[in-house]
Amino acid sequence: MNNSRLRCVSLFLLLFCFSACVFANSVPGGIAMIGIQSASRPSAWYQGNRVLIIGKANNWKAVVGIDLNANAGIHFLEIESRGVKTLRNFDVSDKQYKTQHITIQDKRKVNPDPLDMERINKDIASIALVKGSWLDVHRESIDLILPVTGPYTSPFGLRRFFNKQARKPHSGLDIAAGEGTSISAAGSGKVINIGDYFFNGKTVFLDHGQGLITMYCHMNSIDVSIDQEVQQGETIGSVGQTGRVTGAHLHWGVILNKTMVDPELLISQPN
């Protein structure tokens, strides 16, 4: 094989390695981790939403959140580096999540009345704005910790039925803990929203930069304020049973590029 052909083959293998370098959890609700070789930090977009970039020179990774409703098959990431835009394809595999049936005593939490729906629609609009937050900070890695210690009572992605009625899949991780148990910040970040929502109850959102946002729901007390900077492990409030619940627990959610993803995939030390 001559040198010219050898260089072409080597380049092909290098490009194949980067296009195939995706996280093993490239499934609906999961994460695709796509390598990018660039001297300076690139930018990336997936389905029109800006994507988190971690790493350092010539060893960057796009951390792509995949929606629970995503179809299996080929998906595309748009990358811009030094003014040049390229498309990178990656494969999303199918995944079937388990089903969960829950009985809710408060019937309005399953079939809200018209006044409840007004509040719910306002909640949805408010949370949508939170999901679109973007703080342009540099991150070399992601190392979230569990906000509370306890058994997982409802994992991410469950296909849920409330009082035998189908509802949206579970978009977070439920961790059982006694009411009043301290909740720690999963990572260092900025408090960008505090609310008392119809379904989520008392809730805190922390922005960790580049579209990585964590949410803490059903809280009993909230010990932080809007725009406050918190450190990883710092107490932000306590476990409660506000909103739609069957008992005290923390519903913990993780958002990437405006998409809810499985929190377990980003925990540095799983339970």
Image (spheres, grey):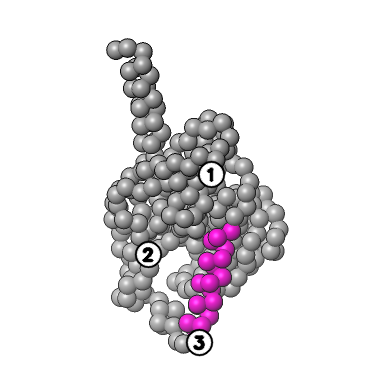
Which of the numbered marks, if any, corresponds to residue 43?
1
Q: Real-space Cα distance between discs 1 and 3?
A: 43 Å
Q: Where 262 sits versus 193, above or below?
A: above
Percent across and percent down for residue 256 are 50, 53
Q: Name the residue beneath numbered marker 3.
A: 115
What's the mark number on residue 254?
A: none
Q: Give the range drawn in magenta.
A: 115-133
Q: In which quarter of the image is the N terminus?
A: top left
Residue 223 image position (x, y, % from top left): 68, 63
Residue drawn at the location 32% of the way across and 12% of the way down: 2
User: Amino acid type of disc 2?
Assistant: Pro
Label 2, label 1: how far apart the Cα atoms are:
30 Å
Question: In the rendered image, which residue does mark 2 sit on?
Answer: 169
Whether 131 is among the magenta residues is yes
Q: In this view, does 230 lie above or below 107?
A: above
Tell me if 6 is positioned left or right of 230 in this view: left
User: Which residue is drawn at the image coordinates 60% and 70% (left, top)?
Assistant: 195
* Viewer-closest of 20 and 244: 20
Q: In which quarter of the image is residue 22?
A: top left
> Could you tell me the amino acid type at mark 1?
Ser
- Answer with mark 2 or mark 1, whichever residue precedes in sequence: 1
The type of residue carrying mark 3 is: Leu
Q: Is residue 185 left or right of residue 248?
A: right
Neighbourhood count class around disc 1 (C-alpha, 10 Å): few under 14, some 14–19, many 20 upward: some
First reached walking from the N terminus: tag 1 or tag 3? 1
